[in-house]
Image: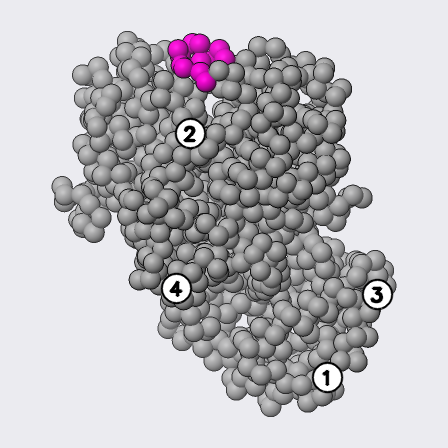
Amino acid sequence: MPRWGMVIDLDKCVGCQACTVACKAENNVPHGSPEEQKERRDFFWNKMIAATSGRYPSVKTELIPMPCMHCDKAPCVTVCPAEATYRRADGIIVQDFRRCIGCKYCIVACPYGARNFNGKEQEEKEYSRHDLPPDRKSWGPWPFPTRTHGVVEKCTFCFHRIDQGLKEGKKIGTEVVPACVEACPSGARIFGDLDDPKSNVSRTLASRDSFQLREELSTHPKVYYLPK
Amino acid sequence: MKSEDAVSQKKPGGLKFNRRTFIKLSALTGVAIGAGQILGPAITHSSDPVPPGAAAPLDEKWINTSCINCPARCAIKVRVAGGKAVKITGNPLSRVSEGKVCPRAYVGLQVLYDQGRVNFPLKRTNAQKGKGVDPKWQPVSWEEALDEIARRLQAIRQKEEPHKLLLFSGLNTRSSEDMIARFAEAYGTPNLVSGDALEAETLKAGNWMADGRYGDVAYDLDNTNYILAFGADILESSRPLARLLRKWGKMRREKPNRTRIVVINPRYSLTAAKSDLWAPINPGTDAALAMALAHVIIRENLYDSAFVSRWTAGFDAYKKLALDEYSPEEVAKITGVDADDIRKMAREFAGTRPAIAIGGREAVDWTNGSYTAYAIACLNALVGSIDVPGGVIYQEGVKFSPMPGIAEDGIAKKGKSQPALDLRKTAKYPLAEVVTNQIPESLLKGEPYPVEMAIGFNSNFNMLSPGMEKWDEALRKIPFYVHIAPFVSEMAFDADIILPATTYLEEWAYDFSPPGSGFAELKLKQPVVPLRGKNRPIPEVIFEIAKKTGGAVANAFAGLGDNAEGFVKYRTASLLSWKEFVETGVWIGNDYEYRKYERLFATPSKKFEFYSGNMKALFAAKKLAAAGDLSFLPHYGAPKFLGEASAFPLVLLPYQPLMVVENGSQNYPWAQEAFLPMCGVGWQVFAEMNTDTAKKLGLKNGGFVWVESASGKIRAKVKFSEGIHPEVVAMATGQGHWSYGKWQTGIGVNPNEITGLDYDSLSGQSAFFNTRVKVYKA
């Protein structure tokens, strides 16, 4: 069984946020509004954060794109009272919307701010994309344009693409990748099997210095970053 | 601490980054739970979150077409399911952007399905025009609208005054541009005005002085080892953006020598954040720095003497000027860049070849901008980076099937002999191809003559131009204004008739990117979804108007394909089969050929000129007063500022973030919520100020302030920053829309409301960065 992981090269990353927008388009993640952003109610499955240090003129801003880290020891899984969030055999942490009771424990537990509560009301116009056809069946092999409100949601490593790709006998990591990896114009993102020493991700990690976010918490994230 | 040290030895960079950066995150997510509390065994489920078979693949196809959410016009493919466009991504067959796109391409779905679009022609029934005045739009039929337009066009020609028709061209496809230009030719007006002089015409003028080619150059980023970016926002507003984003990744980690990138800019831009070194510079002094670099390179004999002696002219005069006037110590006083840093930068630039110096807006959109661009171009020649791998290269064009010549009538001849309203090529702007922002001044004065009618094609100049309120005033003076666009932009708000254009996802067109790749690449646009409402593509509107106008104008459009699709077919027949074009969406020219020195330079010496013979000839031809040899050499002239330093101590720097969709609207939530990546927020515009400066003024971070210039004031939240020159206030452009749309109206402010009117006098480029302001608590 593979263990899917992602490598994000901060030296190649151009901070353009193509990952953020492509993710929204792929997974039909609702957009926010000025009010929602002010109250931090808008949500992203992938978000770029900016962390600035130093004083003029030796300032430094790190731009860090963040999907869900899909931790091997995921705090969100441990705290979920409804077993709505769980770890698939291939290591992807997913959220079962039918089980989720919207208690938000996982949001508090996640040290990466990767989880979002979808509090949008069904009748809100922006809840579903007006650009999608009303007949859900025509939405193609990607299941996530369908939305459930009142639950917690997050990045899935585009498991729908992976599952579909495996079914069609395609190579995951080269022929099939998550939407953010496909979108990255600078080629800063690589996706593949961390347990396969010959995969792109493993070979890159072997050749370069890397780190994970908040390693000290021992959550063992499967998203690795390569410093500049 | 023990574990930290252990990791620290292994990965020092990683851990430091970890601890500092993610403290912030904990604040965001509440108190993070300690590792010991949260670890537990992984739970596995048998079910997937969505039952299998819930969404079976149905009628679905991918269509190759191209984007135009900015002038880069990248090749895209669109997934269409059930007759709806549901996903956009890059077309892998494109070599310009290597199948990649910037995030604006994804926003295309929201452009197409924008709820604020116009779906039928509208006519104004309220004669009074103005911001906040309801135009009382009334829907009319295409027939009625076009008849009225044609009647007026005929009347102007009957009076033999076709020059009194003014055409505005905003961001249009190349096929629409060709149609519009032909219409202007055949009708007989010299007044076709694009927005080019709101971009960086100074770069074109600088290149012209150096190599005789009035245009933008391209850069061979695949092979370069060093980039010195003067004010160039390579990762935000430079073009073609998607190519630059792709190549940045290549330059950093996909070649043996990692390209070193240095950014010179008063603002710590996103590009600066991603570069290796940021050198803040006093606003408007880049020419001095470029000349100081030349000083060091020449003095230390670091230049490419083989290239300089064989393929350049005027080196001695340039050398003397650089050595006499631009010592690092002198220039340090002007630019604020330390003399030792200048020396280091010069040695690096000359020693890490192939190296490229790139000029961009913050460096050249100044009153002295053409000479700054010239000084930057000369640096490339000094290190021999002209038409070599890793150097400056020259964009090749597409060889279309030519259109037949226009049999112009006497009326057209008469109209075109009139001076243009924007005063291009006059003593005021001797070199200019277009002076966009002269138009409101000319219209308001009625000089050289008043206009009768204007047509705007996707233009929105009253938002993009410095001193924008002049545009509003001027537009209201035009007796009859027709606007063609998919939505009611701010400029459309002053129209008498609005014609609803299609978006780029509903029309046939051909397109190509601005200079960047060297080799030629043509992209197709084809309808991916059926038309909404009664919208029509611009070429079809022009065919129709020309036919109705009749005479020589109608004749000029006969046999060109009769509609948008036919026109594209006609023009591309010489390149490839229609079937192939529709399938692939791109046509790619021959590989780039380097070192074409024998036929490269359009200068009197047929070489690259450090002393501009073209400029000397221009001054003689236009009888301009030259300031001695200095007028023909790259040099620094102190920039002119608008407003007294005593009353307005700071300089306003309006910058364009990546997420500005350049079609004249910003009503796109995906673009809005990720608008200011360096601030980590969207949906607004800050007055970004140096922390020390702001504190001295007694301001509170996040509090509202007035930013006031001699021409007005705007209100915004102040954001303290360590990445802004102490004398500068930076503000993002692209917001402040008011004409339509839930997702753009009332969001942010437009710094162009308070910038003043000024120009680079050679090229007619608007100066964007020389407005002085003061900031105080609101």
Task: Check disc 2 and give the amino acid type.
Answer: Asp
Query: Residue at 58% across / 17% down in the picture?
Result: B611
Badge 4 element:
loop
Residue B324: tell me if it is visible.
Answer: yes
Disc number lying in front (2 or 3): 2
Task: Check disc 4 and give the amino acid type.
Answer: Gly
Query: Residue at 71% across / 56% down in the picture?
Result: A228
Circle 1 crowding by C-alpha within 10 Å: few under 14, some 14–19, many from 20: some
Q: Judge from the rendering whether residue B102 lies leftward or rightward of residue B249; answer left or right.
A: left
Chain containing mark 4: B
The residue to which callout 1 is attached is B42
- Percent position of residue B628, x then y: 48, 15
Chain containing mark 1: B
Query: For residue B765, which quarter of the picture?
Result: top left
Disc number lying in front (4 or 1): 4
Nearest to N terminus: mark 1 or mark 2? 1
The residue to which callout 2 is attached is B760
Confirm or deny contact between disc 3 and disc 1 (CB under 8 A): no
Q: Judge from the rendering whether residue B237 lies leftward or rightward of residue B15; answer left or right.
A: left
Q: Where is B644 relative to B201, above or below?
A: below
Residues flagged by tags 4 and 3 on a common chain:
no
Residue B169 part of the magenta segment: no
The residue to which callout 4 is attached is B698
Q: Judge from the rendering whether residue B170 lies leftward or rightward of residue B710; answer left or right.
A: right
Query: Residue at 79% across / 79% down in the picture?
Result: B3
Badge 3 element:
loop
Q: Nearer the viewer, residue A139 or B552?
A: B552
Confirm or deny contact between disc 1 and disc 2 (CB under 8 A): no
Chain containing mark 3: A
